[in-house]
Image (tube, rainbow, N blue to C red):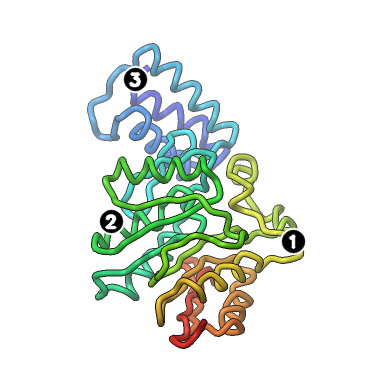
Amino acid sequence: MTTLQLTQHLVDELAPLLGMGEANSIARLVLEDVFGWRRGSHPRKLDQDEQILAWTTINRLKAGEPVQYVTGIADFYGLQLKVTPDVLIPRPETEELVEWILEENGGVTQQVVFDLGTGSGCIPLALKARRPGWTCSGGDLSEQALEVARENAEKLGLEVDFSQFDLLAEGLSTPECVDILISNPPYIPPSEREKMGASTLAHEPELALFVPEEDPLLFYRRILEIGRTVLSPAGKVYVETNEFNNELVAELFTDTGYLDVVRRQDLQGKWRMVSGRRSAGAK
């Protein structure tokens, strides 16, 4: 089997399940990230081990496993990140959150940034790559996720620190004075499971997805509480939200004393982000 034949076989196998466009996109990622071959290059013959890997890869994809877990790579804001089932696959809307932060803080050369629930480390790593003078760090409850984040930082040559913490625990250790606090916390109540893709439910970590049904704003309250303690005067909080409770999260910002609260839509027109500024006199 050659790389060209494998490309066509992937498309033939996946198109009935995913559609021709998605099948072509996945085939490109697999050939580039797993087999090191780009379309337009001269086809090469796969050796015996690669042929075994090819069939294993096809079977995993046909079973619904996300291509990012199959290849072990996710593209995010110009970076190639390692991903495993211990971390969420970074989403385009999270890239938009990063873009918003960079856009609003474009003229600031030094900022202290902390990402609560960092997963693969995608947010602080992307910010550090674009703003080398910023001090970026992140934390997560999962030690397995932190191993992935640290490996990403080392591979990319980016100085970003990652530490373990429980967002809901008292006595959380964060930098003493943070200028920008960021989080993409769990925000999906179990009742919304039927709205989610089967692949996400089967393969991505539930710890990073779901919030108790009876308290969907649980993590946001804690994030804002932490912000009132660790943020510098006029420091800001940026969060990603469920499109169905974005307005409630914005109201929580206001109710807890944050100023200049802004809701923001993603490129699909869904309300997915909120930011707010800590009052200079808040304690």
Q: Which mark is residue 11?
A: none
Q: Which mark is residue 2?
A: 3
Q: Is residue 93 visible?
A: no
Drawn side of residue 64 relative to residue 11, left or right? right
**Residue 64 locus on image (x, y percent):** 58, 36
Residue name at image x 42 percent, y 50 percent: 162
Q: What amino acid is found at the position of numbered circle 1 in the picture?
A: Glu
User: Which of the numbered marks, if any, corresponds to residue 129?
Assistant: 2
Q: CA distance from mark 2 to mark 3?
A: 37 Å
- Label 3 and label 1: CA atoms lie apart by 50 Å
Q: Position of residue 248 (x, y in %)?
A: 63, 76
| Label 3 CA crowd tier, 10 Å (few <14, some 14–19, many 20+) | few
| Helix, strand or loop for disc 3 | loop
Amino acid type of the residue that numbered disc 2 sits on in the rendered structure: Ala
Decide which of 142, 172 is in the foreground and name it. 172
> Are discs 3 and 1 less than 8 Å apart at CB?
no
Give the distance between the C-alpha atoms of the residues marked 1 and 2, in whole angstroms: 37 Å
Give the mark nearer the N terminus: 1 vs 2: 2
Tell me the quarter of the picture where residue 131 sits. bottom left
Q: Earlier in the sequence, mark 3 or mark 1?
A: 3
The quadrant in which residue 62 appears is: top right
Comparing 226 with 116, the one in front is: 226
The answer to whether any part of residue 6 appears in the image is: yes
Q: Label 1: how many residues lie within 10 Å, few (<14), some (14-19) or many (20+)?
A: some
Please name the amino acid that badge 3 sits on: Thr
Which label's residue is closer to the chain start, 2 or 3? 3
Residue in the picture at 33% in, 34% down: 32
